[in-house]
Image (cartoon, rainbow, N blue to C red):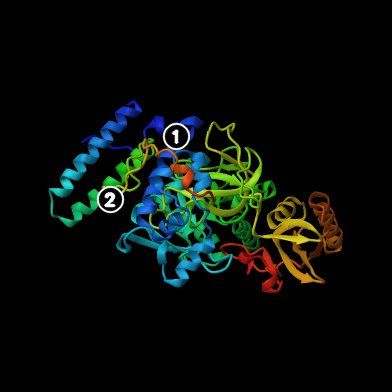
Amino acid sequence: MLKPAEMIARLRRARRLVHEIHVGTDIPQIQSILRHADQNLHWALWNLGEIDELRPDLPGSVKPAAGAKPKPGARKRAKKR
Amino acid sequence: MPRWEQHTAAARRSLFWNARMERMPRAELDALHLAKLRGLVAFVYERSPFYRRKFDERGLKPRHIATLDDYKRLVPLTDKQDFICLQSERPPYGDTLALPFDLVAHHVETSGSTGLPLAIPLSAYDTERYGESWTYGFWAHGIRPEDSFYFAFNWGNFAGFWSCYYGARRMGCRVISGGGADSQGHIKNILRLKPTVLISTPTFALRLATVAKEMGVDLRGSSIRFTYHAGEPGPFALPAMKRQIDEAWGADSGELLGIAEIEAFAPGCPERDGVHVNEMNVFTWSMNPATGAEVGDGEVGENIITSYTNSAQPLLNYRSHDLVRSVGGCACGRTWRKLPGVVLGRTDFMVTVRGTNVYQTAVENLLGEHTGVSPFFQLVLEHADGNDRMTVEFEPDPAVARADWDALARAVGDRIHKALHVRLEVNPMAPGTLPRYDLKTKRIIDKRPKELRRELDR
């Protein structure tokens, strides 16, 4: 059995391959199928705990702030509910 | 190319749809929640005019969310009424939409049982994820890809069963639509097409059982091996209902808790006494509805839900108005938070009768457990002499003789009085006289003047 890290590495590789084919063809049908495939690969990663982005089809628009630390005092400035 | 199997033998033996995530230690789950919530907050701030305005009013920026506690305290609560108002101002979705309109692939709606239906835009990816939320419960219940689903309802815009259809497709099961059949038609379809899973509201499963009996059909001999329910208090909330459905169908009944605009976010537990929050797809916490403060582990509070999977109309810190008791740990091995008894009451269907707060579901639970009371009952609310009044109208089980109805009503009234400390008028009604519903059963008949009702009850 593959370890989770091995599954994740292969899934990421698969997404890159799918994307390569998607941009390398102008057949609408194949692009549509590949887009669906990429959604499922993204979903597989999500369900292995890999949270790169909320959606796979809006590249660059969403960058989860994981790891980013707020500036000192920033939280105090936001009003509580 | 190698030959594909849908599932390997080892996967088929799994008791979990995704054991790694369903049994993940709490600290790891919480770390994942934080990463997802921070991503979601950034997403809605960038893309949703509704959330950007709400955040700006409070001086809240995505970078302020550094802990789960920050998220609970700082991100404003949202409510169905917020979304309905915005949608009414600028149909169909107003400022609630967070994606370009051309990414909306499916328009569905809530049932409208609390007033106007809420429009729910879903992207194609959202429909896949919404569907997946059903499959955890299917697998835990013993349903496998060779099973086939019978949907005993009419296909309209209601979100709940569409998502169930997506879930059945995800599992690779055969899907049969009941279409516009009446109850007898559903029975005939089941006997002819031999599905193994019945999908319906729990009360409709019992109604079908009653109709089958009238037709001379014993459903225990049918192909149905599992029944699975949503939309109303079901077998994992009401032990009496579990017994009735299991006996009538000769099958294992199951249940999940869903909210149409969120998703099927809490699949049934194999212990059959509650549901587990799907912590891959949603984040939940419990709030005292009166004070807004978080309540402790195991205390009753309002379930506040954030969905990670509805990207077209994101719902953050969404008030469900469901009162739940959320606990950690379960004999089934899941670490996902459990809601024993599913929904224990509603904040917005509470009436005060002679100084006592009475929740609809609390009365329903007592009626469902009482021997001799059929699944057909309703609660009539009236206002007289400055007070709200609730009258219970129920149909006795057909096996109860007419001469025993009044004694049964007195026993029901005594039981309610003992459990809820309030004396309600309880009236037996002739079998077949109360209304029947295909989808959500309407339990509350509210005859109070509108101005005397809570906002959501109007």
Q: Is residue A81 above or below residue B153?
A: above
Callout 2: SS = loop
Are discs 1 and 2 located on one and the same chain? Answer: no
Residue that sits furthest to the bottom in the current view = B449
Q: Residue B356: name its quadrant.
A: bottom right
Residue A57, disc: 2
At 42% from the left edge and 71% from the top edge, which residue is drawn? Answer: B91
Q: Chain of mark 2?
A: A
Foreground: B240 or B340? B340
**Any part of residue B415 in sight:** yes
**Any part of residue B196 in sight:** no
Q: Amino acid at mark 2?
A: Asp
x%, y% of residue B13?
Answer: 45, 31
x%, y% of residue B344?
Answer: 66, 49
Q: Chain of mark 1?
A: B
Foreground: B276 or B253? B276
Q: Amino acid at mark 1?
A: Ala
At 35% from the left edge and 46% from the top edge, which residue is drawn? Answer: A54
Label 2 Cα crowd, 10 Å radius (few <14 / some 14-19 / many 20+):
few
x%, y% of residue B51?
Answer: 43, 56
**CA–CA distance in space, label 1 to label 2:** 25 Å
Q: Is residue A42 above or below residue A9?
A: below
Residue B31, disc: 1
At 71% from the left edge and 71% from the top edge, which residue is drawn? Answer: B448
Foreground: B431 or B425? B425
- Labels 1 and 2 touching (C-beta < 8 A): no
Callout 1: SS = helix
In this rendering, position of residue B9 left or right of residue B260: left
Quarter in which the N terminus of chain A is drawn: top left
Foreground: B417 or B76? B76
In this rendering, position of residue B374 left or right of residue B29: right
